[in-house]
Image (spheres, grey):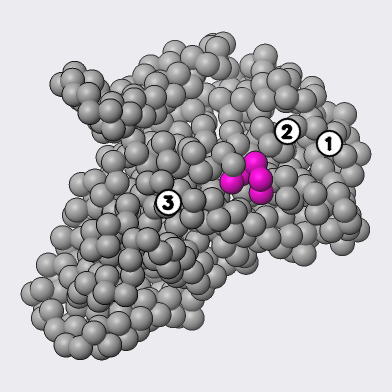
Amino acid sequence: MSDTAIIINTAVAVLAAVLLIVRFRLNPVISLIIGAAYLGLSTGMGAEGTVKAITTGFGEIMAEVGLLIAFGVLTGAMLQEAGAIQRLVSTLLRTFGPKRMPYALSLTLATALQSIFLDVLLVISAPLARNLAPRIGSVGTARMATALAIGLECGIVLMVPGVGTVALAGLLGVPLGRMLIFGLILIIPTVALSVAIMSFVFRHGWWDVAKDEQPGMFGDEATGAQSEAHGQERTQEQTQPTESVQQAGGATQTALEPPEVQERRHISLIVLFMPLIGALLLIGAGAVLDVAGIENPVVTFVADPVIALLAGLIGTSLVTRYSVGRKRVERSIATGFRESGQILILTGVGGSLAATISAAGLGDILGKYFTASTAAPLLVVWVIAAALHIAVGSVSISAITAAGILAPVAPAIGLDPVLIALAAGAGSLFAVHVTSNTFWLLQSLMGQSTRGTLKTCSVGVSVASVVAILLIQPLALIV
């Protein structure tokens, strides 16, 4: 089959999957499998070859990242149950003060808390951010909402153990330690610069409280006075009912838990997070030693991402069990299993489409036109991921699909796969909008209008997307 026919059929397969998801509201898992099946059959792979590519792609990415995603989500679920997130935000407030909170909160969400399922993390952190907003100035709501959006979305696809990041690393064969180090190098300046840019434009008149906020939704007059007391209550671990979370003007509320359920032994915050931090340090240390050419069987074993995250999971289960009791730990683990199931299946079918694209020979074709010395491959990855995200509204799907299209190119032209992973992640952040669940959660939980959410979420995260690809380009010169 000609090169042109393969390129056209690949484009049709991807566009068909997007159309099925957006226009016909078909489940993304089914849509991606249909796209992969069409591509295999249309490029002459035959029924047997097509099925083999789909199943092999699913199995290979699950072998790479399945346990990592499950361990990360379960760890996050237990930290959530122990109230670690509320305490961490209170600690950040005391340490940095209200004026620096947008930076501190955004960087913390993007780096330290990515094991927690995004929607859960947003529901937990948004009320605390909302309470802090009046204390940081007239555009406090805008700055805190933007900080939440940028931190949450960037962490998913740029920082280990974010589910998108782990999936990208597995798909492209990037060692997780290497992905962790390069992701950390990229995400800190990306988040800090993006929050600074958005804060600047908000301070200079790009925020209209009357049109961009919905005053009165949460009793704003009492919010500022209550915020410090709220933080102190969480820090001191008093046995209070969990704060209700309102969505869309009270349309949805989480039930108040009885005081006895909230009882917990006081454990230092650093102790709660130490198992997860220790796991990430082990993974990072393994990557550093690998680069330095130092080999030690014991270090190689404990620094393996699966072993390191397993140790972190076990450690977290022990400290949270001491803090909140066995029953609540078991409940959190059950929640974690439910959350990780859908993530694993979606990641797997993303691998199926990527494997079919590779088997069709697209990588060899594109390799003829790209060279490692040019910026074109990274920009193409970014543009493809951005376009897919605008259409589909899923950060993870768009990143995995874009990376899969150009993954075969990496060995052909000598481009480091970690750069492709980062470029795909950066592109998938562009234009978070009304097709995203994060968009509507931010609108309701932060008391914004749709217009305001378009500014804080859509524009804010898009700025981060552009900043990230601009920072990735210099990395390509040194990697």
At which x and y percent is residue 196? 72, 45
Left or right for 330, reference 79: left
Helix or strand or loop: what does disc 2 sit on?
Answer: helix
Q: Dot 3 surroundings within 10 Å: few (below 14), some, or many (20 or more)?
A: few
Helix or strand or loop: what does disc 3 sit on?
Answer: helix
Query: Is residue 326 visible from the viewing direction of this image?
Result: no
Q: Quadrant of residue 408?
A: bottom left
- Classify the position of the N terminus by image quarter: bottom left
Residue shown at 45% from the left, 37% from the top = 115
Residue 136 bears which disc, if any?
Answer: 1
| Main secondary structure type of the part rendered in magenta | helix
Membership of 192 in magenta stretch: yes
At which x and y percent is residue 134? 85, 38
Name the amino acid type tagged 3.
Leu
Left or right for 453, reference 300: right
CA separation, marks 3 and 2?
A: 34 Å
In the picture of the structure, the residue carrying the numbered disc 3 is 477
Mark closer to the chain start, 1 or 2 = 2
Residue shown at 33% from the left, 66% from the top = 371
Name the amino acid type tagged 2.
Met
